[in-house]
Image (spheres, rainbow, N blue to C red):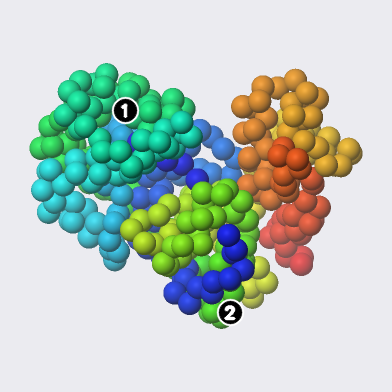
Amino acid sequence: MSPFALNLEKPKVETSIVSLEPAINCFGSMILLAKNEGDPGIHEWVEKTRAQMNAEEFFNHRLVTIGFYYAIVPREKSNSFEAYLEGLDQMQPSAFRDNLLNSYATICIPEEAQKDKDSPVNWDEVLSSAENYVEFLRRRFGDELTEVELETRAYQYVIDPAALKQLITSHLRWFWKSHLQPEWTRVRPMLEESVRAFNQIDMSAMTRQELVRFITGKEFDEPKWLDILETANELVFVPNAHIGPYIHKTQLNDKYYIYFGAHLPEGSKIHIPELDRAEIVARLSALADDTRLRILQMISERGEMRAQDIIDETGLSQPSVSRYLVQLTATGYLQERRVNGAKAYTLNYDRIEKTLKAVSAFLLNRS
């Protein structure tokens, strides 16, 4: 089960860094493949790799990376994905289950489940049947994040640690050799250039809020993540080749990892064609949809609009509009703020102009 989410001006972050993090970086791409549902800007490798996997392979991939996320998430720094795999090979079978269940014991996402956060879990009862196991996950994660079929299959491995380890290690080694290793070989040089370019800039005087904005181009406004951002001992920014305009945040031990789409710092004199091309694709793909363009045009003509106004005007469902707005906000074409508790959106003219200039510079060599 993988979860996908104060005064920020006070602390400086001397230890923050943009880092390659091979194991965590590759792990992020595996999760992206398991969870992504065609959001614009995601690198084509994700869809192509999914298409190359048969139904059983893809189900096992989702089972391992989502169902056993907390059993396998890299917890220690590894210099390579192979070193991370070797570490898994050396683990005792019971350690996989312990990592999984110990994490589940501390997680309560739905508000109504918060009262159970500090209560001990009766694991004998939870693991007595697949139904009890799935119901426990529903209480801890909510219905939306609990896939009954996947978690029912996961239960069969949770009660058999030896089979659990065998499934995890065999699948990850197969996926690495068949799909991830050649892709990592391809993208690693450009990721290293992104890391090098950012780390040539003196960021020691920036606050945490400024670092997030400068490196990712995003703002964090979710209270839960703002609290973690405030208290984390160390921030690590990881450029990923596949995540496109989106960001993913995760906390491991006392470090807070922020995946962002690999790019160069704004104003950088370095030009890496593949990075430039990937960023342009991420930006333009958000525009390659009639409904998203219609929403942008509507907001351009009317000014700031609340999410409910857009739902009423388009006649689309709330989940559909929310997804479009998330996509357009992630790519920077819309700016979001809260007005009387409701989300409201305005057009980001600067982002649109910069997109047009980036296309012109890339294709016509014009700045």
Where in the figure is residue 315, as x and y percent of width and height? Answer: 75, 20
| Mark 2 residue element | loop
Where in the figure is residue 126, as x and y percent of width and height? Answer: 23, 27
Q: Residues within 10 Å of mark 2 (few under 14, many from 20)?
A: few
Compute the Cα span from label 1 to label 2: 45 Å
Q: Residues within 10 Å of mark 1 (few under 14, many from 20)?
A: some
Tag of residue 205:
2
Q: Nearer the viewer, mark 1 or mark 2?
A: 1
| Mark 1 residue element | helix
Tag of residue 92:
none
The reply to whether the C-beta atoms of the residues labelled 1 and 2 are less than 8 Å apart is no
In-image side of 356 versus 165 (left or right): right
Residue 242 in sight: yes
Q: Residue at x 67, y 45 (%)?
A: 329
The C terminus - image quarter: bottom right
Rendered position, 236 above or below 182: below
Residue 201 in sight: no
| Residue at mark 1 | 136
The N terminus - image quarter: top left
Q: Residue at x 74, y 29 (%)?
A: 308
Where in the figure is residue 73, as x and y percent of width and height? Answer: 31, 49
